[in-house]
Image: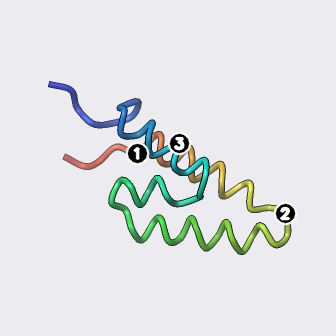
């Protein structure tokens, strides 16, 4: 009866994963390409101290993900 979507326990786990490593939450959700983009962008931008933007985007994206049914 419970539908996976925003606020589901899977999204909370994915958001926590992305909190530690940008893109890990997307990887947990099975979105490999998006995970790679998040990880690479965060790594590149941390060099100029703007990686926190991608890091936050990664967390919010994982938390708000709704799979297409």
Q: Nearer the viewer, mark 1 or mark 2?
A: 2
Looking at the rendering, which quadrant does residue 10 occupy?
top left
Residue with the mark numbered 3: 16
Q: Which percent across, then down, holds residue 5? A: 32, 36
Left or right, 43 with respect to 69, comes to right
- Alpha-carbon distance for marks 1 and 2? 26 Å
Residue with the mark numbered 2: 49
User: In the displayed structure, would residue 41 be above or below residue 7?
Assistant: below
Residue at the spot x=72%, y=74% of the render? 44
Residue at the spot x=74%, y=55% of the render? 52
**Label 1 residue SS:** loop
- The circle on residue 4 is none
Q: Nearer the viewer, mark 2 or mark 3?
A: 3
Q: N-terminal of the two: label 2 or label 3?
A: 3
Residue with the mark numbered 1: 65
Q: N-terminal of the two: label 3 or label 1?
A: 3
Q: Which percent across, then down, holds residue 14? A: 45, 46
**Label 2 residue SS:** loop
């Amino acid at each position: 009866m419970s539908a996976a979507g925003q606020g589901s326990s899977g999204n909370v786990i994915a958001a926590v994963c992305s909190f530690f490593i940008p893109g890990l939450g997307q990887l947990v959700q099975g979105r490999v390409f998006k995970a790679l983009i998040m990880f690479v962008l965060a790594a590149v931008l941390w060099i100029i101290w703007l990686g926190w933007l991608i890091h936050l985007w990664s967390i919010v994206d994982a938390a708000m993900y709704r799979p297409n049914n």
